[in-house]
Amino acid sequence: MKGMRNQVKYAVTMKIDDWTYVEGTMDNDVQSARDRGWRQHGRGQRQEPYWRERAKVGETVQKAGWRQLPRPAEYEELQRWGASGRTVSIKLTGQQWSVVVSALERWANVDDELEDAEGAGRSRSIAAMVENQLAQQGTQLERPPDRQS
């Protein structure tokens, strides 16, 4: 994660409501990463580096989105804002986009288990859109390993 500011950033354009869906997925993924991978270490507990890093990168995705997509101040405008069909271009590093796609795929699997075909389909559709746009920019995502514990 060191030097993330100096890494190349790639823009992906999507509907605002798709980005807010990504934000919700990242919120779930960050919280899940914070809660996972704790092991007894001496007198206390220590989190495995994979989960600690995933939470940190996920948080940087959230913060980048907040900076790049300011929220409307008025409640009435907020109600129309995501449904407007407007698009936004979000710029993230390859590492950040990798975590986004991994999170979307992971939570699509959770939706499958919950028999939420609509949620699973939406997550996979957004993940594919991100990968396609990055491929058009000559970027292949490096997938983080999927950890279960």
Image (spheres, rainbow, N blue to C red):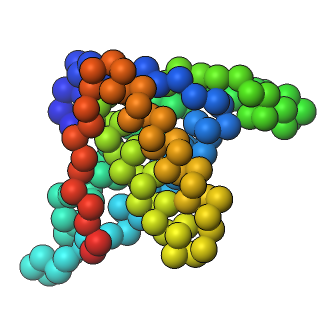
Using the rendered view, name the quadrant where residue 111 is placed: bottom right
Q: Please state which of residues 91 and 130 is positioned toward the viewer in this rendering.
A: 130
**Picture residue at 57% right of the left edge, 55% below the top:** 121
Q: Please state which of residues 96 and 31 is positioned toward the viewer in this rendering.
A: 96
Q: Please state which of residues 110 and 30 is positioned toward the viewer in this rendering.
A: 110
**Picture residue at 64% right of the left edge, 30% below the top:** 15
- How many numbered tags mark residues here? 0
Q: Is residue 80 visible?
A: yes
Q: Position of residue 87 (x, y in %)?
A: 64, 23
Instruction: Say left or right for 125 vs 7.
Output: right
Instruction: Say left or right for 128 vs 42.
Output: right
Q: Position of residue 59 (x, y in %)?
A: 41, 44
| Above or below 127: residue 94 | above
Q: Position of residue 125 (x, y in %)?
A: 53, 45
Image quadrant in which the C terminus is located: bottom left
Instruction: Say left or right for 124 vs 118.
Output: left
Image quadrant in which the N terminus is located: top left
| Above or below 96: residue 70 | above
**Picture residue at 57% right of the left edge, 28% below the top:** 14
Using the rendered view, name the quadrant where residue 60 is placed: top left
**Picture residue at 24% right of the left edge, 50% below the top:** 144
Q: Is residue 63 visible?
A: no
Outermost residue toward the left in this view: 42
Outermost residue toward the right in this view: 76
